[in-house]
Amino acid sequence: MSESGGRAPIPGGTQIAASQRQVNTIEQQRQTIQELQTPVIQVWDRILALPIVGSLDTARTQEMNEALLQKIVDTGSEIVILDITGVPVVDTAVAKHLLETVAASRLLGAEVLIVGLSTNTALTLVHLGLDLSGVTTRTTMAKGLELAFARLGLEVIRRSRRRVTVAHEPDDN
Amino acid sequence: MAQVPIIRVGEVLIASVQEDLRDQDALDLQVRLGDALEHTTARGVLIDVSVVETVDSFLGRLLNETATGARLLGAQTVVVGIRPAVAITLVELGLELQGVRTALDTDKGLALLRRLIAREDGHGQSRLR
């Protein structure tokens, strides 16, 4: 910036404008990612699901926990299914964050099931020597949901093939 | 400050905390709960902390101790109504209250206590963990 004689044209003006645009774009994208990253889904009465995509850092875990706990209170949920299929690497830090979520949810009376563990992840966790004895895990969301139903005393039954004609027949009168 | 009232409903003692607990009040509650368990036939304790906004390490530890103590006196303890912010604080403090059962609200807490007591009596074992 020039200090005297009014506004002299700034030599790098266009560059500054360009980098300002970039900053704006990055900020917008950051916002979008932030909105995308922690959806808490109610999959059934008293069951929530939380698909995690991407890595978990401290800030993200915090936001996720806040959103999740509030949802537990709002919906009166008793089971939370945490799907880590989309988490590329589960290292000590990520595992620690997951355990925080488990502990915080438990304090609100909700049990957390972690699903989507791959063989690699399981072995990594074992090699890291982390204590996961208090956590229930399954390989897929389907198995997790099945377990959640069992915990809540629900049962999924295939409807019989026989068509129920009487009940649904429209009235012709 | 007023004492935390301890209400007896059937086999359950309900301690309904009315405001943020100071250390002394919490200790007092612990003693009176123990007393009540000793002198009644109560089998369960329900501590409602839904109005509590601040929990420090002392109170967290005390809740754990109270639950462990109650178990020695033959009663199950459920803490209900922990607020999300309080839960996050407790976890950050490393106080996960491993020894305490928890529930979202009094209603769910009472249901859990009933199940726990029934399980102790040897009923409905297969349904529960």
Image (cartoon, coloured by chain):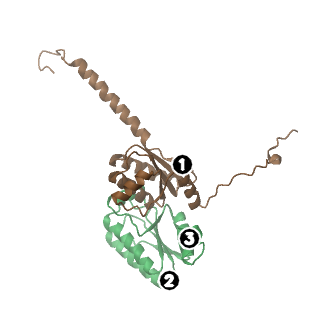
Chain colours: A brown, B green
Chain letter for mark 1:
A
Q: Is residue B116 visible?
A: yes
- Judged from the image, the secondary structure of the residue bearing numbered disc 2 is loop
Query: Residue at (51%, 78%) from the top-left corner?
Result: B43
Query: Residue at (87%, 38%) from the top-left corner?
Result: A172
Q: In front: A134, or B81? A: A134
Chain letter for mark 3:
B
Q: Which mark is residue B40?
A: 2
Query: Residue at (48%, 61%) from the top-left corner?
Result: A109
The kind of residue on which mark 2 rests is: Thr
The residue carrying mark 3 is B115
The kind of residue on which mark 3 rests is: Arg
Residue A55 drawn above or below residue B26: above
Residues at marks 2 and 1 touching, judged by CB atoms closer than 8 Å: no
Q: Is residue B106 left or right of B22 when viewed as pictured?
A: right
The residue carrying mark 1 is A42
**In whole angstroms, how far apart are the C-alphas of marks 2 and 1?**
42 Å
Q: Are marks 2 and 1 on the same chain?
A: no
Chain letter for mark 2:
B
The kind of residue on which mark 1 rests is: Gln
Q: Which mark is residue B7?
A: none
